[in-house]
Image (cartoon, helix red, strand yellow):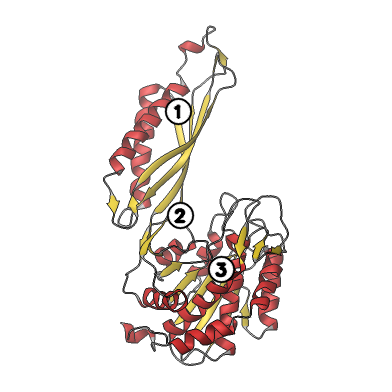
Amino acid sequence: MSESISEQVVSLVGQSVDEQRLLDTATLLVGIPSPTGNAGAVADRLAELLSGEGFAVERPVTGHPKSPAVVARFDTGKPGRVLQFNGHLDTVHLPFVPPRIEDGVMYGSGVSDMKGGVAAAVEAMRIVRDGDLLSSGGVMLTAHDLHEAPWGDGTQVNTLIAEGFTGDGVLLPEYHCHNCPVVGRGQAMFQVRVARDGEPCHEVLGGIEQPSVISAGAQLIGRFSALDRELEQLTHPLAGRESLFVGQVHSGEIFNQSPVELVLEGTRRWLPGNTFHTVRQEFESILSEVADATGTTICADFTESRGAYEVDQDDPLVRSFQAAVAGVSGEALPVGAKPFVDDGNAFVALGGVPAITHGPAALGAHTVNEECQVAELVRVASVYALSAIAFCQAGTVEEDA
């Protein structure tokens, strides 16, 4: 059946958002420092809050006993779809900024990325439960640590997925809201080390006779640039093109010394249909050829962040979400791509669960100047509650098969 939301329900949900309760939740979460790897205290407090409000709460360890994940559920007791809200509680390793609210804007560490969004998702759960707004199915909230790279590796959410803590669709309240992202590129991060035997030495005392790690590095960069030009031809109508990007190069101590090592770092992004295995083989082939040609040793860490994915634009999750957005804002969002990788890639690739990233129009992610308008948190809470109503109203999952 087509997902639809009546004007009466849209109005009721809008009136049901308790702004102060939402801000109290966001203030609570933002107020507890939780750098990646150390989100245990805020996870504990979120679990206590949800348990105290009557939600069924589990604390699966999911490979990270320092900070067990939080899983909260509201189940109508009637067969139907389950909509999952998933968010990370960890923040990047920057100086902690306590929460404050001024002139309708909330500030503080993690309010943009993504504790504000998690608080909005919690408020959405309250709305659908307290208003008895779900005709079937239920809502599940999952929250976890180990998201932010390079301190985290994504393994906690991977384990949640592997252990079956998934719904029939998932919304992720990251700071992305200008389109409905149905496709995302995969990403790998790389660090390449070019080395030669021996010790650093003056250029006129034997250095010029040594294999040049800088010349080898230049050849690598040239090969990478050529490959990137080829990748311009691999495009997707929504996601753009594949790419290979070099962002850092380091070598040497002083201008006339022959160094023994060069390090370069960057990213490789690919489209649905391509695989991490294929792009890694292509990358490693270039390293081997340049090493043979320059007399150097070249090795690399080539680490997958997340794989590429695409969600059917006619999926019930997409239809439900778009109906919710239209109810709140007056019109649906254009379909598009997600420019970054996040946990949504993992839900699609590892769990086969359709995922949409949508959160507040927040600013300052990965800085000490995170901020989010209170009105945006309220908006996201309404969109999530309405998405759950539309997604769960259509009966059992089997009816969609």
Nearer to the camera, 337 or 304: 337
Q: Residue at x 46, y 84 (%)?
A: 389
Please report contact status of discs 3 and 1: CB closer than 8 Å, yes or no. no
Label 3 is placed on what type of residue?
A: Glu
Frontmost residue, 3 versus 16: 16
Q: Is residue 39 above or below residue 252?
A: below
Asked where in the image residue 318 lies, by quadrant, the reply is bottom left
Q: Are marks 2 and 3 in contact (CB under 8 Å)?
A: no
How would you rate the neighbour count of disc 3 (Cα within 10 Å): few for under 14, some for 14-19, many for 20 or more?
some
Q: Nearer the viewer, mark 1 or mark 2?
A: 2
In the rendered structure, which disc, 2 or 3, sits on the residue that comes first in sequence? Answer: 2
Marks 1/2 in contact by CB < 8 Å: the verdict is no
Where residue 256 appears, x then y in whole percent?
Answer: 55, 13
Rendered image: mark on residue 297 = 1
Q: Is residue 291 left or right of residue 58?
A: left
Seen at 53% across and 87% down, the residue is 12
Where residue 91 appears, as percent x and y from the top left, is 63, 57
Residue density around tag 2, few if under 14, some if 14–19, many if 20 or more, within 10 Å:
few
Q: Which quadrant of the view contains residue 217?
A: top left
Residue bearing mark 2: 340
